[in-house]
Amino acid sequence: DIMNPVIILKEVNHMQAADDTVAEFQLKTGRHDFDSGITLEEARERMAEAVSNFMLVAVCRTQTGLSDRAAYISATETQLKQTQQTREMLRPFRELSSKSYQSKFIMEAQRSIANLEQDIDITPTIHALDEDFLYSKPFHSLVVANSDTTLTANIHVVAQDPILLHPKLPKAASQESPTFAIKGKSQDSFLQSFTKKGDPVSLRELNMLTMAKVLKEYVTEEQRVKYEKYGRKLEFLEDLLIKRPPEWVETPIQLTHEGNTTFVRSPYTQTPEAEFIPLKFRGMHYAKAMSPAQIYEWIVYDAFRNIPSSE
């Protein structure tokens, strides 16, 4: 929108709008700014140009008798170009954060856990509250139509708090993207009617696949090189088994920090496909993997935060 532009000025950081100094009390809370590649004077020139262009467009767009029509046209073109560049810069994160992509990720997580030769038609039910989610029951069924048999599964999901990067950092230092708690069906629960392709994909493997996909398809070459050269690396460890589902609901994705590496463990729990388990509780698989949006946030931003080592 020409009258309500959102513009990100590349290489300009927040503190260059002030005195270019992050206060000591802010640093103690884990807040800090990225290092700008330009001087304070250059940054202020860019900000002044953006503000003056906006003022010229906002004030003069309805005037017909402009004395300097060329200046207005130049300001409009520059603002439109900067707005378009900002949209393109934010496009990957907006796509990964969209409801459609989140649903795609959730369904792929269930398919990976089942890891069947056959495809599964999955319907995720999104819950607003942890309590409603905890008492929900996923199920699968066979649908026969015109001699074709389709495997369907209804799974349950709740969006929980974003990842808190370190317990000593304030909540404001958390990620923006929520963690998705997924309650689906285990591979064993499908095997009476269908064939497994291989072992269930672990959350560690799912995290690694998501990391590779985001690096390949959603970050720019500049962002990838910067992360690989300077960023704090993510290393995915074995999944964290939580014995009881209510405890699993309350357990976040676990992060520990050592040197320039952050170690990630995804919590899970499951119920066996066994006769001593009541039928409605059998064959459940509960999982929390890092979402593509969370991994994108890490690659482009969190990897460059000042995060203290874990105790």
Image (tube, rainbow, N blue to C red):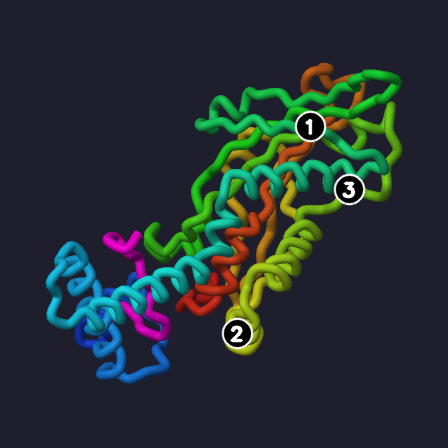
Disc 1 versus disc 3: distance between alpha carbons?
13 Å
Mark 1 lies on a secondary structure that is strand
Kindly identify which numbered label has been placed on residue 200: 3
Residue lying furthest front: 65
Whether pointer 1 and pointer 2 mark residues with C-beta atoms closer than 8 Å, the reply is: no
What span is colored magenta in the figure? 1-15
Which marked residue is nearer to the observer: mark 1 or mark 2? Answer: 2
- For image coordinates 24% across by 53% down, the residue present is 3
Kindly identify which numbered label has been placed on residue 310: none
Reading the image, the residue beneath label 2 is 222
- For image coordinates 88% across by 33% down, the residue present is 195
Residue 186: image x %, image y %?
Answer: 74, 32
Tell me, yes or no, whether the highlighted magenta stretch contains residue 2. yes
Q: Between residues 311 and 299, which one lies in front from this camera angle?
A: 299
- Residue 303 in sight from this viewpoint: yes
Residue 157: image x %, image y %?
Answer: 55, 31
Image vertical order of residue 274 relative to residue 269, above or below: above
Question: Which sits earlier in the primary sequence, circle 1 or circle 3?
Answer: 3
Tell me, yes or no, whether the highlighted magenta stretch contains residue 178. no
Disc 2 versus disc 3: distance between alpha carbons?
35 Å
| Left or right: where 3 falls relative to 63 | right
Reading the image, the residue beneath label 1 is 284
